[in-house]
Amino acid sequence: MSRARTESLVWALASPASTHIRRLDHQAVVYDERSGDTHLLEAHAADLLARLSEAGPQAEDDLAERFEPGQLDILLRQLQDLGLVKSTPR
């Protein structure tokens, strides 16, 4: 289910200095120093996390251009649940 977009959000890595990303073909392994957790992400989640890592905080509207409708909301929620990304109002 898609979250209603009543306000524009800006998304960023929760802790850029302690999030380590290694690409493996169409996946990525992510190590979060803060929690000690290691995650294996599928291609779309890996692409999204890499974009936030390389480009810094991004407006949700700008991120949505690269994903199918509803897909971005699911990916952001999953990455937020893992503690890898955070949002702030624009």
Image (cartoon, rainbow, N blue to C red):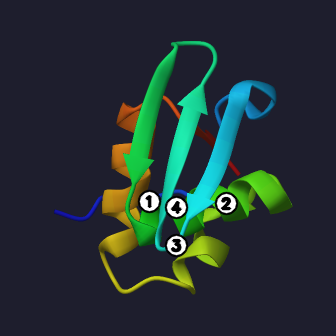
| Residue 35 percent coordinates (x, y) | 51, 13
The nearer-to-camera label among 1 and 3 is: 3
The nearer-to-camera label among 2 and 1 is: 2
The nearer-to-camera label among 1 and 4 is: 4
Q: Is residue 20 left or right of residue 32?
A: right
- Element class at badge 4: helix
Instruction: Identify the residue under disc 1.
Output: 6
Distance from the alpha carbon under mark 2 to that under mark 1: 26 Å
Considering only order in the chain, which callout, 2 or 3, is on the residue closer to the N terminus?
3
Instruction: Identify the residue under disc 3.
Output: 25
Distance from the alpha carbon under mark 4 to that under mark 3: 10 Å
Instruction: Identify the residue under disc 4.
Output: 46
| Residue 50 percent coordinates (x, y) | 67, 60
Q: Nearer the viewer, residue 46 or 56?
A: 46
Q: Is residue 1 left or right of residue 7?
A: left
Q: Amino acid at mark 4?
A: Ala
Eyeballing the image, is 16 above or below 7? Answer: above
| Residue 67 percent coordinates (x, y) | 46, 82
Distance from the alpha carbon under mark 1 to that under mark 3: 36 Å
Residues at circles 1 and 4 in contact by the CB criterion of under 8 Å:
no
- Element class at badge 1: loop
Considering only order in the chain, which callout, 1 or 2, is on the residue closer to the N terminus?
1
Instruction: Identify the residue under disc 2.
Output: 50
Assign the N terminus to one quadrant of the image.
bottom left
